[in-house]
Image (spheres, coloured by chain):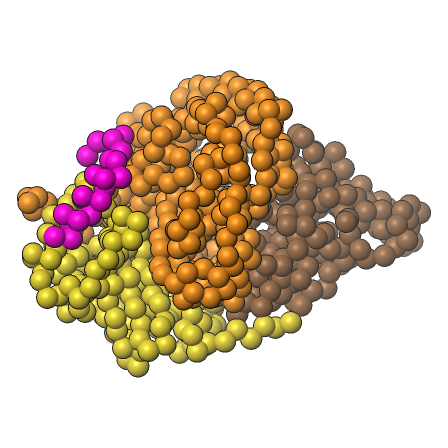
Amino acid sequence: MAILSKVVNWARRSSPWVLHFNSGSCNGCDIEILAALTPRFDVERFGITLQGSPRHADVLLITGPVTEQVKKRLVRIYNQMPDPKFVIVVGTCGCTGGVFSGSYSTNNGVDNVIPVDVYIPGCPPRPQQIIDAVVKLLAKLSPNKDKNGGTNNGGK
Amino acid sequence: MVANEIPSKEEKLENVESLLTMLKEKFGDAILDSKIIKRRLFIDVTTESFRGILKFLDESFEICFLHTITAVDTTSEFELLYHIFIGEKKVNLNLRIKISRDSPKVPTITDIMPAANVYEREVHDLFGIVFEGHPHLERLILPEDWPDGVYPLRKDYKMGGKK
Amino acid sequence: MTEKVVKERYTIPVGPQHPALKEPIFFKFIVDGEQIIEAIPRIGYVHRGIEKLTEERTYLKDAYLVERVCGICSGVHQATFVNAVESLIDKPTPERADYLRVLVLELERIHSHYLWLGVAAHEIGFDTLFMYTWRDREVVMDLLELITGNRVNYGMNIIGGVRRDINDEIIHKTLKGIDYLEERAKYYLDVAADEKTILARTVGRGILTREQALKLGAVGPTARASNLAMDVRKDDPYLVYDEIPFELVTADTNDVFGRIVVRVKELFESYNIIRWVLENIPSGPTFIRTSPKVPAGEAIAKSEAPRGELFYYVRSTGTLKPYRVKIRTPTLANILAVAEMLKGEYIADIPIVFAGIDPCISCMDRAFFVDVEKDKKWVWSEDELKLYSRKWYKTHEKEVIQRWKR
């Protein structure tokens, strides 16, 4: 079983399936995520592909401050993802609520709703920062290549 | 209407003033107050007359465009502003009515200007103003499980801040 | 005295009553088999309480808050808000600042239209075109970053002017970038006009007559593709638009194809506007100092955002914070129009018709369907709807081509 988990870990490290979810963001972060897919930044060379269904995703890439309307759905999607799963928050809104903190309609950040592994601050963060964070997460998954001391903080 | 012709500032002011004159002639006492700010016309009218005025404008001009409906809570009453653009004259007209805060009801204008459908729903969601005769005054933007009777844009609603 | 204009009476039908869904949904579709009888908008997904938040913050902080109403057209949100506040202050902003604002706004229009072209191409399954347009768009992003310091959410405006200036090097780079983009846009116009797949999916789809566009309050390229010549830059010029020579672009096909053509042609107008601005920009200061307390009063400001008319109303009571800020985005103005367009279309057409209005909402997320014939109800996510649409188009290819050729 140890060999199997090494293989699975390797596959996950080489080619994570990423689910992108917008929890009420202004779209700024979402278009930088999409830009990361395009030829200039080309995140696909890392084997990262965007998935449609939570049941096949390893990584949840989430933007936005989590509006009230979307909260239950986010929790449900998180629960549908198989273990092990990882959550990357893209953008300041997802980290702390950003400019919308204190609003009657938002939850001041994703970690008030589901657990988070990597935070990428920025309004929005550049595609390079997003790719950097995802790559750092991949490195975390690999037990031999521990580039950053295994801490939770994402790309700065 | 030739869209590429841009009237000069003087022509625009003339158009605004002539529209105001036309409305005053037709509706007289229903117009309580009027002012022209930067070539934009703001008129205060009675609640009984506003539908008639909008109907008259819609029938007199081909392009009588409703930008949106703004509600303002002045704490003593609610103000409703109907923002209109008259295409042929390139005039911005803002029609204001005042209604009571205790029982805020006003007739709909969706029969005259169907575009008002979403704007009235938005005001109803955030202020609790009832637009009588609206075809379906359902929730538009607040969450499905938002409590009834709580209107976040009223001045007596204070934001909690869930920090 | 103008004659009475006779207009068709127009009623908005109400769908059958159904119990409220606990899920946030974007549209309720009443269908009969594969055809849509009626579409009722619901929205609500992205509501963040911004109008209330503006009342708690100072005017300058609000200028940065309203940028984030929409990350794609953030510049025009900030510019319109600042415009409204500046008319309350009633001191003229320097000419150079207005020229710089137009420069950023037109660059934003270009980036937004390229973004939309890529997304629309993706909807039709044309991923290569998506990659091409977004690669070209990076040229615009570089220029925006050069001029404003950021790719998205530029923060270019302050109350009283702009925060940064340009120099000859920036002007030179911008003109070079525009030349390149113009070549690319010519290529896309050819592709759009000739490619059978695009034509079959968009010609005759999402019909909105001029009469309907007027009655339902449609704005932007959506309205202009129905031969409704309304553009705030011409109807109610702001900044320097009353001096800049450019054409108002319309189409008369009333369909999704028309909306593509209008947006691509607008790109050419934007390139010319930018060239004119850079040639004629006067020297001088880029901002004036203003007091943080804004005089009491009320003001409206309108702009032509890439998606259509953007409307702001600001009321001040003479303090540091606004009393009321009302924002009406162009997508809200187009909601009734898109509901009308979807009537009679197939379910498989929903993604492209909806994309045709260039909605400034992250996605349509969830749609609720009610089949009145079969007495079925179901909810689909955006992905499920897109998957259904792609499959349907594959299996009905012959029918689709016939429908287009008719």
Residue B136 in view, yes or no: no
- The letter of the orange chain is C
- The letter of the yellow chain is B
The region drawn magenta spans: B1-21
Based on the displayed image, in which of its 4 quarters is residue A73 positioned?
Answer: bottom right
The image shows residue C231 at horizontal and vertical percentages of 33, 38
> Which residue does the image show at 29% across and 53% down from the upper left?
B37
Q: Is residue C196 left or right of residue B129?
A: right
Q: Is residue C402 left or right of residue A53?
A: left
Based on the displayed image, in which of its 4 quarters is residue A153 positioned?
Answer: bottom right
In the current view of this chain or complex, which residue is farthest to the bottom? B102
The image quadrant where one finds the C terminus of chain B is bottom right
- The letter of the brown chain is A
> Which residue does the image show at 42% across and 45% down from the upper left?
C92
Residue C239 in view, yes or no: yes
The image shows residue C182 at horizontal and vertical percentages of 49, 21
Q: Nearer the viewer, residue C224 or C155?
A: C155
* B19 part of magenta stretch: yes
